[in-house]
Amino acid sequence: MTINDIPEDLLLDCCALVKANSIVGCKRNSVYVIYTYWKNLKKTADMVDGQVSYHRPQNVRRCEVEKHNSIVNQLKKTKEERHPNLYEEQQAYMRKVRETAKERHRAEEKEKKRMAEEARKKREAHEKIFSVENIKIADDYDDEDDDESEGEVEGGDFDAFF
């Protein structure tokens, strides 16, 4: 949203409130309210209190405001004053942050345990396949195949290779 996209009704309400809450503005019939982005405000140490200038004057907008007591009265009726306990709100927020961090940590630990269990099962399966007993059994099967084909050597004399 840009500064030019602010709805006219909202702008008029805000400017009427600014005029009504101003010490000098509330006494006059018509005043100009100047508005801009906060980043555009330029304040240096040699300036008087309340005085500001602008980094980019082309981003400054002016709005003339007439006396609109009806708008101000309507807005004051809907005004809601809150006196929050900021310490309690901060503590509740920090508690919520800690709980989400704990939940995330628990989920990570659970995932690590699951991955370790999968790795352990794979390792056990691998060890079972390549265990000494299975290798001996496989070797016995190979020996039985060798017994059947002992006299048959393809390609001529077998001793010639050694």
Image: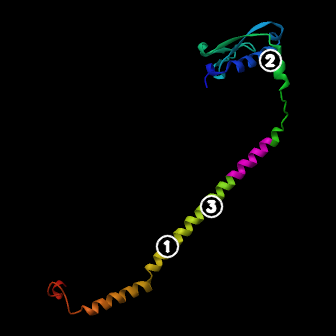
Q: Which residues are magenta?
A: 89-100
- Do the residues under discs 3 and 1 have CB atoms within 8 angstroms? no
Q: Which mark is residue 109?
A: 3
**Colour scheme:** rainbow
Task: For marks 3 and 1, give the CA distance.
Answer: 21 Å
Give the spatial CA distance, label 1 vs label 2: 76 Å
The amino acid at mark 3 is Glu
> Magenta region's main secondary structure?
helix
Residue 53 in the image: x percent, y percent? 66, 13
| Circle nearer the viewer, 2 or 3 | 2
User: Height in image: 12 above or below 111?
Assistant: above
Q: In terms of secondary structure, where does tag 1 sit?
A: helix
* Image quadrant containing the N terminus: top right
At label 2, counting other C-alpha atoms closer than 10 Å, the crowd grade (few under 14, some 14-19, many 20 or more) is: some
Precedes in sequence: disc 3 or disc 1? 3
Q: Which residue is mark 1?
A: 123
Element at label 2: helix
Q: CA distance from mark 2 to mark 3?
A: 58 Å
33 falls in the magenta region: no
Q: Amino acid at mark 1?
A: Arg
